[in-house]
Amino acid sequence: MSKAVSELNGARYAGLAEVADAGLRGMITLRGDLDSAVLKSAVQAATGAGMPGIGRISVAADGAVAWMSPDELLLLVPYEEAGAKLAALQAALAGEHALAVNVSDARTYLRLSGEGAREVLAKVSPVDLDPAAFGPGQFRRSRLAQVAGAFWMEEDGSFGIICFRSVGEYVFKLLKTAAHPQSKVGVY
Amino acid sequence: MSTRLAKHGRLIDRSKQIDFTFNGKTMKGYAGDTLASALLANGQVMMGRSFKYHRPRGVVASGAEEPNALMQLGTGDRYEPNQRATTTELFSGLQAQSQNHWPSLEFDVLSINNKLSRFLTAGFYYKMFIHPRPLWKHVYEPIIRKSAGLGAAPDAELKDADTYEHFYFFADVLVIGGGVAGLQAAKAAAASGAKVLVLEQNSYWGGRAPVDGGTIDGEAPEAWIEKTLAELRAMDNVTLRDRCMGSGVYDHGYALGYERLTDHAPGQGGPRHRLWRIRASQIVTATGAIERPLSFAGNDVPGVMLAGAMRDYVVNWGVKPGERVVVATNNDDAYRTALVLHDAGVEVVRVVDTRETGGGALMEAVREKGIRVELGRAIAKVKDGKSVTEVAICAQNGEGGAREIVQADAVAMSGGWSPVVHLWSHCGGKLIWDEVTASFRPDPERPPLGDKGQGFVVPAGAANGEFGLAALLEDAAVAGAKAAEAAGFPATTVAAAKGESVAEAQMEAVWLMPAKADVKLRMKSWLDYQNDVKVSDVQLAAREGYESVEHTKRYTTLGMATDQGKLSNINGLAILADSLNAEIPQVGTTTFRPPYHPISLGAIAGEARGEIFQPIRKTPMYDWHDRNGADWEPVGQWRRPFAYLRDGEDRHAAVNREVKNTRENLGLLDASTLGKLIVKGPDAGKFLDMMYTNMMSTLKIGKCRYGLMCSENGFLMDDGVVARIDEDTWLCHTTTGGAEHIHGWMEEWLQTEWWDWKVYVANVTEQYAQIAVVGPNARKVLEKLNAQAGGGMDVSREALPFMEWRDGQIGGFDARAYRISFSGELSYEIAVAASEGQAFWDALMEAGKEFGVMPYGTETLHILRAEKGFIMIGDETDGTVIPQDLGLNWALSKKKEDYLGKRAQQRSHMVDPDRWQLVGLETVDGSVLPDGAYAVGEGVNANGQRNMIGRVTSTYHSATLGRGIAMGLVKHGPKRMGEVIEFPGTDGKTYKAKIVDPVFYDKEGEKQNV
């Protein structure tokens, strides 16, 4: 629907790394028993992706599943399909003790890419971003300076970053500051 | 006078001359100079005035331990006081000013304090200025502030021109210190495969070794340092950072590194400082040692320096401290200074060695140069002045009589070396007293402990009390390997580099010079240069009963200055021990706290400044509000419009307009910030019955109910409307500030107490833009939008009655509409996807034109609810108020066996009939009561204050009623309807208000139910 606008509305900045609004993304928070076969197959059907391990994201063609906590997953789906995917998920989980809600519009989704991406992120998040410690497929809920955030690494070495919509602008400016061209750390 | 030598100066580049200014005078230095070395090269020995007595002071050290040479650097938005000349790298255009003098460094009026020093002893301020009390604030304090102190504070109106940042880094082994011990330890740790980070505070590596001499693996130390650096740089698992000081060690291997990126090149762009926030499995402290001064009279006269520092100035920066130097020592190391000075062409007029038996090979080498060495001798006194002119020499083992006067312009002193144990000690590492070196060193049996009880700091080299190149390098290699092994890497042995240095004779512990110095000498023998604490002050404290070293520290201010007693602490506590007739280890040390050396506040703040100082939470319609006159109000981290100001309107006029328009036509409120929690599961109803005071399990699907939440102590903590979504799903609205807190509160109960209940909670606050459509025309605008869209949700009174909700489409938007009212008017709160919020708002504004639509802000929201007598969490509640105080007994379920807070509300104090209770307040003259004003009753309390009988909780001008209205909590309030009570204001007036019903408007509630 054309009425929907992402919080950052296409903003981008190129410094040590490129920071860009990654647009609207369908997101579903799913809480339930992650060992349940019903839940697993419902997740697979919604995203095309299998269950991720602890602290990981499992990525398929147009969907992905991220491990959020021992009883919570984050499902990534195309924005326009979030409503239908949610309905299908809820139908598949009928009778199971589970909670699935659409949080697509509650979030800002950014992409951080380029050579300096690890260092830029390591300035704002207390996470070991050494290539030996954090690689593609890893997913982390942490903080981005003063706000909650989560990120993962794609196969191409870029990071997907999500935060709450209300602080999307803060996170964009934060990453932009951290990506100042003259602030290279030079360790990764 | 000090000058630049023609030779020497391994760190300076004589081809790069640099201009800088000191107190406005242009001077020249070289690239590689510190400000201190450049000032000395220009003959500027006196660099400041002391803190209390305004005595002339010169540089005494060459590194981070410097107490005297503090400068005001830069100007305007790059001005900074109290910067050490010794750690300031010289750059072109540097502007330095000395501190703590008036009118000038050379002539200082307040140096009269020096003449009064007999009266300004330890505890003087405490004793002198305690009476009469009022004089402290208005007379004494301003005078003392003018007289005592360091640099001037920066201009409060200016903002720091620089930026700062943090960087998180993880290492298996963190090595603090890049001297030869640090490099050796790093090499040993890295050989095991561990990830190693090495921090060096200076811009150069290798520490003191190149100055102190000896050989490593048969070569000069420089050659080994270069080779080892090259090896370490070639390893992928090693990171080396210079200009980065390890400033603190904290619990669980957390450490801070303070990297100074542009201090030596201001304005080059990028952050000025970077604070490294490091997690390390193991930390090696290779922090070296600091030389101790000797306590003789006049040991603070400009030109008196630590012997090692004097050596540094010659070797590193090619600066000679004077023409004629006296060296005073209790150990062999200072003879190295004599040799270096002699080699540089400086006349060493005397070496006075306190030891009757003298030193070893180094002393012999000095004698061979023809330098006069006197044993068992001491400095009785250096003559006061702006520089050294005369040195009186006497027997060490005496009172200072029978002096020989020698002419000299500089003095090198050495009282021995103390390991830098600060970082070892920050997190609880313990110390032992080493009789041989007369210093505290790390106790290997008692390191700081990590999460599993394991030691996580390993000291290395001189920091571990190992002096002499051979022992130091061996110790460092073992430390590095031990740290790597403790970090989980296979044990490896790396052969230590083979160090050779001249063997030294036993030093002698000397804490006072001469040993029985009379009181006149002791009153001029400085322990703490920066805080002007003398031997006599510590002795006085001991006589007055300050036996604990911590008490003595605070009474005398020993070690409390910005250098934290790096030079003074050991000497001071030795004097204290002597005064108390105790052993030094019994007296112990004061606590070592981070940071090791002052770090900038900018580095601590990091990137948090300007527009990212704090996150500001914005609703989807924020930009629209901003363009349309929003006068912003912070609500937690959210920004909400207080009111929308039109041209020529003030806040008050805007609010009155918004109130009237909402009551008469149509108002829109951005209510997106209200918390929205989804609670789902077979046990959700049971759970909500515990969370809320009301019964939520019986709420019918499609209906809404206002609910109260109390803490386990019974106090009202949040309120909001709960909607039943389906058989096992509820949506709970919380206050704006309560969303995260109440979410956490629910999770806590579910995870800790009722972990077996089948309930899940999700916070969906930000998924929705929620707009309150309020006023007599509310339904009309929604019906118009639906008509325009060719149909939509039936919002009629019958299809969507008061306190119900429906899902559907409004104006073509997927929406959930709640018929709830916080204003007393016909009202719908409509939630749409946040991403469509602006579009929906625009549609309402457009369609609402013909119905008189206006947005309204939080102040109007408050007034509308106050006119209706609705309470507001945070106004009527403050953490001490229970629902019963607010007349909300109707919302406390009598049918439920339990809810959080129920038991607490039955306690005697909670059912006390004297508790203040909610009433309405109407001023007799129609004015507005001051917010927070207290009502006074008869009599006075034990403190002679008027007895209080109530207070104002909310107070507004009601545009609807044309008068002031208020709510308040009043003792026996509901039983006192019609009584007039008094509220003294802070403006001197007394306000009279009548106690009335809190519902001022539409008491029957007809207007919201149409």
Image: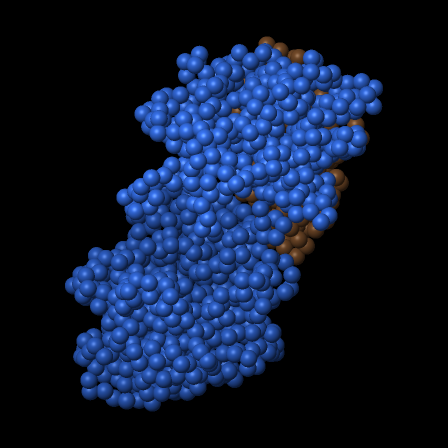
Chain colours: A brown, B blue
Residue under the point 59% across and 25% down:
B1002
| Residue B353 lies in quadrant | bottom left
The picture places residue A42, in percent across and down from the top left corner, at 65, 16
| Residue B878 lies in quadrant | top left
Residue B620 in view here:
no
Q: Which of B870 and B653 is in front in this view?
A: B653
From the viewer's perspective, tell me whether residue B870 is left or right of residue B819.
left
Q: Quadrant of the N terminus of chain B?
A: bottom left
The picture places residue B174, in percent across and down from the top left corner, at 47, 50
Going by the picture, which residue comes out furthest to the top?
A95
Residue under the point 56% across and 74% down:
B95
The picture places residue B797, in percent across and down from the top left corner, at 69, 16
Residue under the point 34% across and 77% down:
B113
| In the rendered image, the vertical position of residue B850 relative to residue A118, given as above or below | above
Going by the picture, which residue comes out furthest to the left?
B581
The picture places residue B875, in percent across and down from the top left corner, at 50, 36
From the viewer's perspective, tell me whether residue B821 is left or right of residue B665.
left
Q: Quadrant of the C terminus of chain B?
A: top right
How many discs appear?
0
Residue under the point 44% across and 12% down:
B895
Q: Which of B343 and B553 is in front in this view?
A: B553
Q: Nearer the viewer, residue B965 or B52?
A: B965
Q: Which of B915 and B518 is in front in this view?
A: B915
| Residue B386 lies in quadrant | bottom left
Residue B429 in view here:
yes
